[in-house]
Image: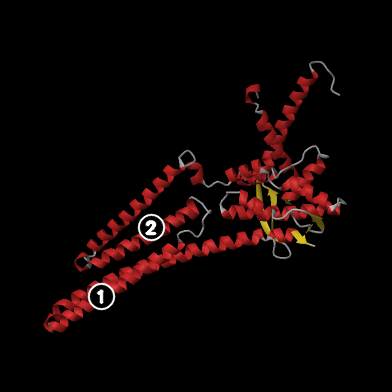
Amino acid sequence: MSAELTVGRGTSSGLGVIRRISERLSSPLPQRTRFLRELAFDLRELTDRLIDEGIPPAEAHRRATEALVPDAVTLADLDRMHAPWYRRATLHLDPGRLHRIERSVFAVAVIALLAGEAAMLLQVDLIGYAVPYLWVVLCIGSIALTAIAAKAFELWIKRDHSRLRRGLTSILVLSGATIAVGFASVLLDLFFLMATLEGDPSLAGDLLPHSLIQYCAILSIAILFSLAGGIGWLVLKQWITLTEDAHRRTLELDSTLFQEH
Amino acid sequence: MTGNDFDVQGFARDINVLLVLSTLRDGPKHGYQIALDVETESNGLFRFRHGTLYPILHRLEKDGLIVGSWSREGGGRRRKEYALTSEGERHLYGETDRVGEITTRLMKLLRGPGEAPA
């Protein structure tokens, strides 16, 4: 049973009009938020205007709701109108098939990124200084960057805002893991190097320069990946937080439309 | 214009568009004001119900016939206002002539040849 509520300067029954419409719309979140804000203002103003004209508050609310609150057909119209171009272009594809195609594209992207990184290492003649752990760092870093690209694709191209925070923690963990693996591998290798030099100090001249270049290579690559991952995570998180906050503030307009006795 | 060109459902949609555009001739308005003015100025003959006004407004905005702008009212709440663009004005006048022609032909058909208009 709904509580009796005050609408603007009138009274009416009915909770959560804005929330109900929000749940039934599948448009991308920013468009949805803007529409709900517009609807909330218009509902309140039209109700107040009708009350000013001498119409009883309950009737004013009923008329305003009837005029402005979208029914299922209108909501579908709005969703169609605000559907992102990617959704319109892939409408004819089976959702399962589309999902598989997207996953394959990102898998190919990881492999291509790894291949590109290997080619770059060859170009700067770093392959000779590559320790096995460097490939682990490159792998984790590539997965982190691809995860960022995938999340950006989901948010800004596909505009699927049904699960905004999905995958964010994984991106942060992968970015952190890159630098963690980098440092751990350097420390481990340093330990073995020092143990070797302790046994035979004369090897220092041969081993130290080569090892130092290896450590610099792996650390700088790990730091770069970690930085890129961290910045990517931050940009995504900021956008998600701002979008969610704007939407939450809009849903709170329900409480300004309807004031409890 | 031949009979083959005339789309009845499209005509109904066009009427809705023209109703919205015509109310904006007087100046920028909020969505609720557009709905109210259409009903008032047509003496209740035309009424927007179930939020059907919004897809029309958003479509017109996308097509560049009207432009929406946000402003802040007291309390920090934001509200949206729509204004007619010059392209919208051209569209309004052009389509008004077309609707006039259609209704003239329709009345001629309904009244029959040689019948004096009421």
Q: Residue at x 69, y 50 (%)?
A: B82
B77 over B57 or under it: above or below: below
Left or right? Give the position of A154 relative to A3. left
Q: Which residue is mark 1?
A: A188
How far apart, in angstroms, are the residues tagged by discs 2 and 1?
28 Å
A233 over A86 or under it: above or below: below
Query: Residue A71, how many percent across, how many down?
Result: 68, 43
Q: Which residue is mark 2?
A: A146
- Which SS class for mark 2? helix
Disc 2 marks a residue whose amino acid type is Thr
Q: Residue at x 70, y 44 (%)?
A: B53
In-front residue for pair A209/A253: A253
Q: Residue at x 29, y 60 (%)?
A: A117
> Quarter of the image containing the N terminus of chain A?
bottom right
A214 over A49 or under it: above or below: below
Subunit under mark 2: A
Q: Which mark is residue A95?
A: none
Q: Quadrant of residue A207?
A: bottom left
Query: Residue A190, how many percent across, how many down?
Result: 23, 77
Instruction: Specify few, some or many for label 2: CA neighbours under 10 Å numbering under 14, 14-19, or 20 or more.
Output: many
Disc 1 marks a residue whose amino acid type is Leu
Mark 2 or 1 closer to N-term?
Answer: 2
Q: Quadrant of residue A119?
A: bottom left
A237 over B58 or under it: above or below: below
